Amino acid sequence: MTPDLTLATIWAFLIAFAVFAYVVMDGFDLGIGILFPAFEVGAERDKAMNSIAPVWDGNETWLVLGGGGLFAAFPLAYAIVLPALYPPIIAMLLALVFRGVAFEFRWRDPEHRRWWDFAFTAGSFMAALSQGIILGALLQGIKVAGRAYGGGWLDWLTPFTLLTGISVVAGYALLGATWLIWKTDGRGQDHAYRLAGWFGLATLGAIAAVSAATPFLSHSYWQRWFDFPHVLATAQAPLLTAIIAFAFYRSLKKRREARPFFLALGLFLMGFAGLGVSIWPYVIPRSVTIMDAAAPAASQGFMLVGAGILVPIILAYTSWSYWVFRGKVGVEGYH
């Protein structure tokens, strides 16, 4: 049984969609955890936590779909990526568990709340940093020997992966600040506006640094971005990013509420599109393509039926939960 190019492409885009949905939906609540020490103890912190309380747990559904989809649809890629990235993946999963426990016990154990707040921040920071490192490790390439990982335990740890890790931390903090602009009011909202301005600059600087470094990782990256006629299309990416950045800071100056959040997501979308331009059609850049890693066509087709039913259901109940908990949040919850 052989893979089918159409099914492999559909599954590649479905997994990419799941990963981006995770970044969109879990990025802002990780960002709130990263920013937590900057909030005033008491009402400001309570409002920040209440703004994500109804949705944060369901946001991680998309991470499960992305990881499970990779295992089922591209098993060879899964078998290579996991051994190559065990340390940051384990760190990410433990951090997500740690911050989840801290989130729950913060309310149930007020006597030790400052320690739970620290755990919430540390877990959020480590999860975001690990995700950025994983992204950087994939971009810089994974050593493949035959059909297995051929590198060492710490091959993932380089200056480039640390750069991408810090970049994701800055980007998630930006999403968290813009979410709070949308969901809070008063002094907390004023604070969120200031944080969004600073982390907007940090995110734009990170985008510029990663974009400048990526073409030097591989000649194939350089060709895709700068060789003619590719450059005619790829040159639109920095132009669109600049336009979004201008609109973002204009929206902050005019004190818009929802718009900064969606413009921040636009910056993430441009970065995600740039990642796709760099690596397509590889699932492990320069080593394994989607066709090399794809499961048999019968398996992918069977799973696609289930995904075609479940993904719209997940989107529907997720949209409903966000609709139910729309509006501003107070110390006691939404109002």
Image: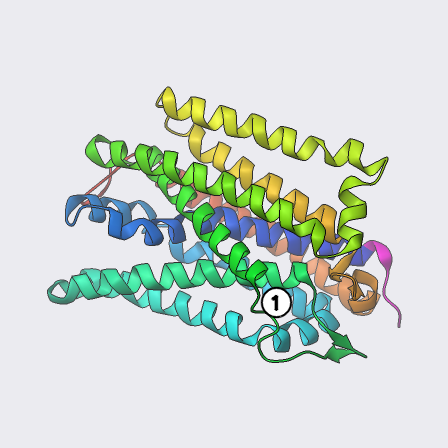
- The region drawn magenta spans 1-6
Q: Quadrant of residue 47?
A: top left
Residue pointed to by mark 1: 68
Q: Nearer the viewer, residue 15 or 315?
A: 15
Residue drawn at x 78%, y 78% as measured from the top left: 147
Secondary element at tag 1: helix
Residue at the top extreme, as displayed: 254
Q: Is residue 207 left or right of residue 108?
A: right
The answer to whether residue 327 shows anywhere in this view is no
Q: Position of residue 264 (x, y in %)?
A: 48, 36
Residue type at mark 1?
Gly
By secondary structure, the bulk of the magenta-drawn segment is best described as: loop
Residue drawn at x 74%, y 61% as measured from the top left: 285
Color encoding of the figure: rainbow
Residue at the right extreme, as displayed: 1
Q: How many marks?
A: 1
Which part of the image, by quadrant, shows the C terminus?
Answer: top left
Residue drawn at x 34%, y 49% as measured from the top left: 32
Q: Is residue 47 left or right of residue 224?
A: left
Q: Nearer the viewer, residue 242 or 49?
A: 242
Q: Position of residue 234 (x, y in %)?
A: 74, 36
Q: Position of residue 129 (x, y in %)?
A: 46, 60
Say above or below: 330 vs 256: below
Residue drawn at x 57%, y 63% as measured from the top left: 134
